Amino acid sequence: MPSKPHWSTQFSLTPSDIDALIADLLEGETPLPADVLARRVIELRLERDAQALADRYADLLAYDPTQTYKKGQTIAFQGEQLATGVVTAVESGLDPAGFCGRSYGKFKRMTVDIDGETATYAAGIAEGVVEPSVSDLLTALPGAETMSLDDIMEVNGAKILASVNEALQSNPTLVRLAGKWFVRDLMQDVTVGHLNLAEAVLDIAEGGPLTTAEILEQIGGLGDSPQELQEFSLNYAMNEDERFDEVGPAGEVLWYLKRQEPAEVREKPALLRYTRIDYNRDLLTADMLALEAEVDDELSPFDTVEDVDEATVRLIYAHRRLGTIPLNSHTRAIFPTARRAPRINVTLVDAHDGETYSGWVVNDEQYVYGAAEIYRKYHLPLGAQFTVHRSSTPGHIVIAVPTFRPRVEYVSLMSAKDDRLQFDLQTRHIGAKFDEQMILGIDELAPIEALAKSLTQQKKNLSTVLKLVIPALARLSPQGAAHAKTIYSAVNVLRRCPPGVVLATLEANRDFENVADHYWKLSDA
């Protein structure tokens, strides 16, 4: 028969479990994280089960040959398997002189019924082997626990943690903040005056970020209650106040004044907004999918690649113009996340000179703001490549731009006139690494912006945009064709669009012809 699943596989909190956790929170006067509470409730469950087992076998005696027993008593016998039996008779025994060359003196012969079978044991021997105590035998009794607290949490910890959070969330007497739980009625009073002082402290700090402890120190605290309770109470009050924004990564609380956050952080910039286009991904060949993965646009439907130490970024127009870094499938693993905070304040570090810049991770919108100064410092063109990796300092992300002595390169300069696009090969001094198929230059932004605005206002579809871009790019090539990555880079100057959509549109529309090796031109038909 298959063994019965361990109770922890279908764990759920009972009202008594919740009452016990609330009692712990009240006694400790300290907010606790869900994982600590989960371990505590399992510990309590194990203690209750162990006590119930001990009560069940309260009259059980451990067999010890030196002791005497009475008819009707229940005895536990330790062997390969634990057995329990009831004494049915006790008689005087003879001295087994000479047994193994040794005399034991007088003893009792005890008859025991074990699961319907009769067995005989010696008792009352003057000398004997000390047998285990009943407490030692409890772990082998039927119904005894087979897994330790650590074993249970290792195997079923995730399910238990989810169950604990769900049960506590539905309890109106409890409050959760920054991953910790506490009793609502025991929270410290935070007045409007306290919050006004907190605003003033952040204002002096140019908006932040500041820890709760730093704010409490400046406003004089909330009384004599434990520091952790004061921090929890102030965190809760500030979280309910629209003036403040919690901008710390998971596990850390940092506060910022919303009105002093960059506008590009509070609201997604228009240049990054993508109007969704339905397309058939089945049109994408293996080569196209490989190219899409190489570009790694944040709008592409890729899962986050875990265990990444370093990620490469290829700059397209919107990110270069705004000073943003895309949160694509690789960079998402580098930048911090948060349980609930929509914005996270980080420090961007230039790998070359160690200069630091304030950065903002906007996870929901898939970008990081704050790299404009680095882009300008190294004169990065569209198509430039750089890497990002975590620093040993928490909250610091290192941006490494591969640079070298500027050298003359041919760059496709993009211009617009009378709703027409033009590309001209011009020489420019480039001192940074770049993708040869994505590099573009723009000398005059105003005409390009006007064309992009006109296309949007006229609601021109992607095919129309491609018919503007491809012929203009094709004039630069003897073959009269343009590479898909160049097309993608140019299209994204005029409107935000991921590569998969561009490739699928090219493949689906007979107006475009795939020459070879990702090169496209307008069809001759």
Image (spheres, rainbow, N blue to C red):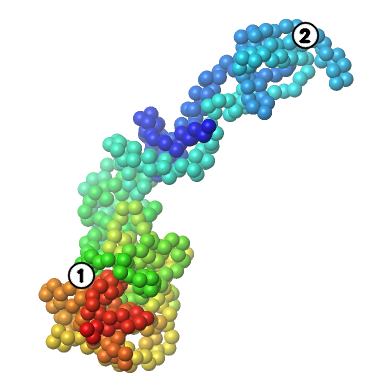
- Residue 270 numbered mark, or none: 1
Residue closest to the eye, 233 or 114: 114
Q: How many numbered circles does the render carry?
A: 2
- The amino acid type found where label 1 is placed reads Ala
Q: Residue at point 52% right, 41% down?
A: 150
The residue depicted at 43 percent of the width and 88 percent of the height is 405
From the viewer's perspective, is the residue at label 1 or at label 2 nearer?
2
- Left or right of 267: which side holds 387? right
Q: Residue 27 placed where, x, y %? A: 40, 34
Q: Residues within 10 Å of mark 2 (few under 14, many from 20)?
A: some
Q: Give the side of residue 391 with respect to residue 479, left or right.
A: right
Quadrant in the picture for residue 410: bottom left
Quadrant assignment, res 123: top right
Please state the horizontal and vertical placement of residue 168, each as a whole percent of the image: 34, 38
Residue 379 position (above or below residue 272): below
Question: Residue 415 or 503: which is nearer the viewer?
Answer: 503
Q: Which residue is mark 2?
A: 93
Residue 12, placed above or below residue 204 = above
Front residue of 178 and 43: 43
> In the rendered image, is residue 238 in sight?
yes
